[in-house]
Amino acid sequence: MEREAPLALLTALSERAGEGQGRAVLVSGPVAAGKSVLMHHFADRAPSLGLLPLTALASADERHLPLGVVRQLVDEAPFDETDRARAVALVEEGVHAARHRTGTTGPGLDPAIVHGLCALLLELAERRPLYLAVDDVEQADQASLTCLAYLARRLNTARVLAVFTHGGHGCDTDFRFAADLLRQPNCHRAEVTPLSPAGVRRLTAQHLGDTVAEERAADWHAYSGGNPLLVEALVRDHLGGGEAGPRYREAVLSCLRRSCPDMATALHGYLVLGELDHLEDLVDLGPARTTEAVHALIAGGLLTMDGFRHEAARAAVTGAADPEELARLHARAAVLAHERGAGTDVVADHLRGAGGGVLEEPWALPALEDAAAHALRDGAADRAVECLRLARAVCTDPQRRSRLTAALIRAEWSINPGVSSGRLGELVEAMRKGCLRGADALTLARALLWHGRFEQAQEVLGHLAGAGQPADPETATELQITRRRLRHTYPSFLPALGPRSAAGRPPTHSVSADRRLQAVSALAAVLGEGPNHEAVGIAQRVLHGTRPDELSTETVESALLALAYSGRAERAGAWCDLFLDRMRSRHTPSRRARLGAVRAEIALRRGDLNDARRHATEALTLLPPISWGVTVGAPLSTLVLATTAMGRYDEAQAHLDHRVPDAMFETRYGMHYLYARARFGLATGYLEMALEDLRRCGARLAQWGMDTPGLIPWRTDAAEVYLGLGRPEEAKRLLAEQQARFTFMPSRVRGTASRVLAGASAPAHRPGLLRQAAELLQSDDGDRYELALAFADLARAYRTLGEFRRAAAAERRAVIVAADCHAEALVRGLAVESATALPTPADGGDGLTEAERRVASMAAVGCSNREIAEGLHVTVSTVEQHLTRTYRKLRISRRADLPPLLGGPAAGDLTDARRR
């Protein structure tokens, strides 16, 4: 609002009015640009210029009151008693006459009444010049406008400055009063314009100072378009610690309330369309009025040619709009979009916002289905779900409704599989009635299996088996995919699909389906036959050819696990990171969670305990445990294994305490869970329970034809349990059996087996086996946690043989690797072992007591005073005293100097490893 020019004009005209040369001024400008401020500001100055101010405010709410504006002027006028009585009588007579004629305001007034009222005001001006101002004159009642027009035509020799503010373009373009007024030779027009960027800076500086004004003025000019009401609201929000907050939103609504109906109509139309094209067709204002209203919205700081100036403005207008009006506009927009051949995504967006009869149009249902398919390809699963839910709600054909429900389940699966569980029973009934078949029935079977509803899944799979070989390639492909998936995930239910077709691989209906079939087949081959180069090659080709718009979780997950279970965990991790990155821009939380669980398992197989824990936790955060169904065993087992290896036993126990579905133990995920529980039992001393879980796991895997160490090396862990139970011969037998049965095993499995075998062998043979284990576990597809265990066992083996220098070197490497993979319990255990096993020099040359030596050795490997105290069962104060005496005796001043003197691992190396 740049008011200087209009204010100067009024000042100059006031001087002429005082000399008997009356003038009228029509002040126009955008909504809330400062017209009223200008009028009232000059009213405050008028007495100092010798003018008597009389002001009135017109309102749309009072248009039905005849002479309402004139009555405000009369009430303010300082008439004497006689003139006031005469003025009141004329007003009352005019009101009575107007109501008597039409019941409201009437088409006009008795000229005598008009003349009498204006004469009284002109006579008052003879005694003292008048500043007569009417705000929002376009809202005035017709009777008042008649009087004001009469007065304006008689200002030439009157001592009156009459000022009328008017909403300008976009408001009452056929407003006759303004047109007639501007034809008068004594009338002037003044335009109040929005604030320039410099004006916004000056206004901001008045409240916040120059520094903030310089920083914020450009943004606030963009958000407000120079509308002073919006600028001041932004300033107040800033003072309240926010940006475009509640005051800004209220100011936007204030502008909208003060605007004319055409502007509100156009703005609501834009809110529905999201663009200015075709707006005139939607709002029924015609091209001219629509254009005028849009220009007024832009001038008022509410819109630009590209849309709302701030999302807070859009939110404010949306929240205040009448939902029924928006629904009506969406319905009309849907019809218009369909008629002009717009994309189905545009039509569907409007159908989602509409209601009523438009959804019954024959083109509405196909548009919603097609838009849902496009949305799924674009990764907008939430939009697809909305389209399908709406389509399902309006569909009356039972068979088509069943197909829509199956499509809805597939779409919801990308967001949260748990939300669709309530619709599965409906689809089972539809299948029984013959309304669901083919690929849609397979969708139902997979969903039932996921949620552990195995009896119903068995019924659906039996129905599919009894239906014979499907005729269409799509269903044939899906049937083969389901058969292979059952083979490696729900093996108990494979017979339900009947014997395998002898026709070989079916013709696939799309490249995407073919990739999915190849990926699932590769994983089934690895789990059934063990690692093989052909399956690895297929998995890599599938991953390389999968495009971002066909990120099927089943395809990617199967290919990644085929690599991981074949001993290619490092390669699988790189691919998984790539796909997770691609998924960040797509609203598919369920897919991200499932892929995150795979990434966690891959990290665990690499010995990256912290990453495994982080990815698994994120997966269970993205998708709550209740929505995982029987597959919850995947992220939970990874969490248990990772936290157990890290020494966080309470945390691992909390994950084991989580309730899991009984049906999970009929799936591959249940075997992962049993294995994780056994590892926890082994770490915490519950050896018999661990052995029972491992035996149960091994028996089921053998029964299902999935007994491969690349999946779960249960024999190796059972052998380790036997060592703990003092039965080394049993341990050797199991390891020999594993070696004999599986000619090719991943380096990680062979390295771990070699480590455990060393524990069952004679002391002299242990170092060789452990060096072999370390070599295998250091390979590209090794396991850093298992490597740390191998080095730790190697240190013990060397100590047993009295080779303390070699033991110290092995221990140093064990500590560094263990710290690097966050195996904190192993680090602490090594420190305690080092302290208790360190030989004392025969001559006692260093002067350390046995207690001081033990404390110093633990401090040398990076243990804190509290950790040393807990490990040696002494107080922290005792540890501090021992260290003080040790520093004095060894003539050192810091812990970093301890390792080379004591022969323990370098604290600096340990610190670096922990940082990594």
Image: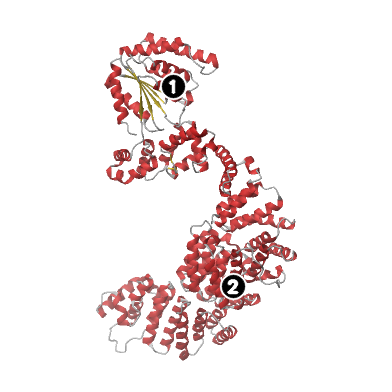
Disc 1 to disc 2, C-alpha distance: 83 Å
Q: Quadrant of the C terminus?
A: bottom left
**Is residue 913 toward the left or the right of residue 768 in the image?**
left
Residue receiving disc 1 = 177
**Is residue 912 toward the left or the right of residue 572 in the image?**
left
Q: Position of residue 776 (x, y in %)?
A: 47, 82
Tell me: residue 18, above or below residue 244: above
Q: Quadrant of the N terminus?
A: top left
Is disc 1 placed on a helix, strand or loop?
helix
Quadrant housing residue 244:
top left
Q: Give neighbour class at mark 2: few <14, some 14-19, many 20+ (Cα, 10 Å).
A: many
Is disc 2 placed on a helix, strand or loop?
helix
Q: Amino acid at mark 2?
A: Ala
Q: In this view of the protein, which residue sits in the foreground, 843 or 377?
A: 377
Q: Earlier in the sequence, mark 1 or mark 2?
A: 1
Residue receiving disc 2 = 522
Quadrant housing residue 184:
top left
Q: Position of residue 130 (x, y in %)?
A: 33, 17
Tell me: residue 672, above or below residue 301: below
Q: In this view of the protein, which residue sits in the foreground, 7 or 458?
A: 7
Q: Give neighbour class at mark 1: few <14, some 14-19, many 20+ (Cα, 10 Å).
A: some
